[in-house]
Image (spheres, rainbow, N blue to C red):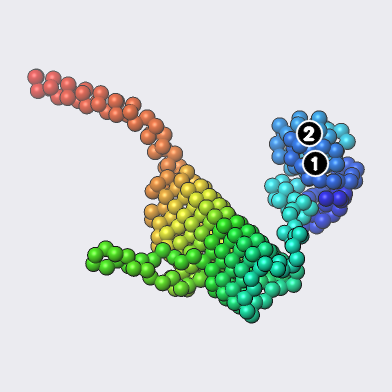
Amino acid sequence: MDTRASLIFAEFSATGLLTAMEGEDVPLSGIASVEQCGPGDLVFVADEDQVGTIRGRQPSAVVTSPALKDVVSTLPDLTLLIAPNLKLAHAMIRQGYVDRDVLISEWPAIHPSAVIGPDCVIGEGSRIGPLVVLGGGVRVGDATAVMAGAVVEHGAVIGNRTVVHPNVTIGYDCVIGDDVIIQSNAVIGAEGYGFAQDAKGRSHRIPQLGRVVIEDRASVGAGTCIDRATYGETRIGAGTKLDNLCHIAHNVEIGQDCLLTAMFVTGGSAKLGDRVVASGQTAVLDHLEVCSDVFLVRRAGVAEDIDQPGIYAGAPVEPYATYLKNTAVARDLSGLRKRVRQLEKEIRRQAQEEQGE
């Protein structure tokens, strides 16, 4: 990174991400954390406690919120950039100036060890790493990186500016959109879990011949598995982010801009709306529907449809306010049991006294 504060401000003020710049136009050589910053660095300050830390480290520029502007401005010799959405500014400025460029590689554009099947199309500026296998008819868009050891089976399509990290498997006929990131060891398009039992209880495989479609801007975490559909397609909506070690079963439909964290799991044919947020180890049973703008927390277990936006928790899930009340009661079950027994004794005593009269 070798730029100036004024250049960053000019680029991101045009989109409203930065709204003001105060101080000198200083040169910047890097972006650092609050704890590790120093002269020449740009740093993001999100709370007042961090101000004391940077006081002694003397970074050259700070990006902070309007609420912290007056506090940070008390530090001497510091250029301020004001961002109404500090977290978004953090994301976009780091992407723009210090992110890894996956197209810069020590390898040739197509490594000699890669196996390229017949009728493949590889777009301009794309990179195919060592030991990659592309099956027949695979199409790779422009400026896309398919890294070492990845396998893309026949007929699959990968869009533009997409990153397929090492050892990913993308099954036949699957479709990956533009600006998608698939982290290492993810499996896209494995056969869905479908079996039929005979009279002796033996299971017989039901061929799963559909595909997986991952729309633009989606992200798939390391070790995540997305199964192909029995018929039709399993679909991940645009902008949805899947964390590591998630499992998406066959025929599932996930809407746009969902945030699904580690060990999220769905049964087959479940449907999630847009902007669903799920904390770790959330589970949704098969054939259920979750509407848009739902938050699932505290290891939520969805056992019936959710048709109202809101926050839900527990297993089976219940509205968050109800969950908190029930949890508070459950913490004192032994005390509640003791009080109930005392009441029972008192009722029996009163009954005996009335009988004695």
Up/down of 190 relative to 67, above or below: below
Residue located 71% across and 32% down the image: 49
Total marks shown come to 2
Task: Please provide percent x and percent y for residue 94.
Answer: 75, 50
Which of 126 and 279 lies nearest the eye of the viewer? 126
User: Which amino acid type is marked by label 1?
Assistant: Val
Which label is found at residue 62? 1
Whether residue 96 sits left or right of residue 257 in the image: it is: right
Residue located 65% across and 61% down the image: 148
User: Which amino acid type is marked by label 2?
Assistant: Ile
| Residue carrying label 2 | 54
Kindly indicate whether the residue at mark 1 contacts the one at mark 2 (C-beta within 8 angstroms).
Answer: yes
Q: Secondary structure at mark 2?
A: helix
Of the two numbered discs 2 and 1 on the same chain, state the one appearing first in sequence.
2
Is residue 303 among the parts visible in the rendering? Answer: yes
Up/down of 168 relative to 353, above or below: below
Whether residue 11 sits left or right of residue 270 in the image: it is: right
Which of 8 and 193 lies nearest the eye of the viewer? 193
Residue located 72% across and 48% down the image: 90
Is residue 182 among the parts visible in the rendering? Answer: no
Task: Please provide percent x and percent y for residue 244.
Answer: 55, 52
Question: Which quadrant of the figure has residue 198?
Answer: bottom left
